[in-house]
Amino acid sequence: MKYILVGLTGVLLVLAFIGGSSYYKGQQAEKYGFLAQKNAELFVRDYSPTLGSDDAKVFIVEFMDPACETCAAFAPFIKQAMAANPGKIKLVLRYAPFHDGAEDFVKILEAARMQGKYWETLDVMFKSQGAWANHGHYQPEKLWDFIPRAGVDVEQIRKDMHSPAIAKIIEQDMADVKTLNVQKTPGYFVNGKPLQQFGYRQLAQLIQSELDAQYPSKR
């Protein structure tokens, strides 16, 4: 009888552990959503710049290049989608510097982040892109004429942009670009699902499908 009780106790403990583990995983999935997926780190690294609520359940991951004209064109569209769904969408930026000299642009952007001016600098880059990244008349050195508009210390950026830490960020992002087979910028993933056909309408549909899945309307 004694051994039977010990055996039953052991079985109950195992079942309790399994049940508790399943509950914990369920709680984690509920809390972290997309981030709880096994391959989530391919899309969101600890260092990745993000915009939006920490409680958002829809992650728009964009592999971008500061010199990419289409990236600049889509930036207002993404902001509009976020504004229309307050607290529900989080934007994550990753780098795919495919254009000539684009790694330097990324380095400038990351150096500006050290001064707390990341989004301001990206906005200046996109708005002035026609002057320094026009592919018919490429003059990347002209970017330095516009950078002060972001309210940054330009000389400090010139120093910080050569940080080994920034080089590692680019290296890791490019490794993820290869793993995820990102061929061009901007490359979009919404909660890990790739945008199969590129376009404003297609991206809007992908975002909406994830919003509907993560925030089902109550009937």
Image: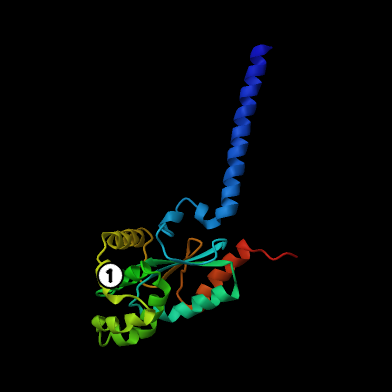
Residue 182 drawn at (x, y percent) = 37, 66
Q: Which amino acid does label 1 sit on?
A: Glu
Helix, strand or loop status at disc 1: helix
On screen, 199 above or below 30? below
Residue position marked by numbered label 1 in the rendering: 103
Residue 190 drawn at (x, y percent) = 50, 65
To which quarter of the image does residue 142 belong? bottom left
Q: Quadrant of the N terminus?
A: top right
To which quarter of the image does residue 132 belong? bottom left
Q: Would you say 69 lies left or right of 206 here? A: left
Residue 148 drawn at (x, y percent) = 33, 81
Query: Residue most toward the top?
Result: 1
Point 58% across, 39% down: residue: 21
Point 38% across, 76% down: residue: 121
Query: Residue most toward the right?
Result: 219
Q: In which quarter of the image is the C terminus?
A: bottom right
Colouring of the image: rainbow
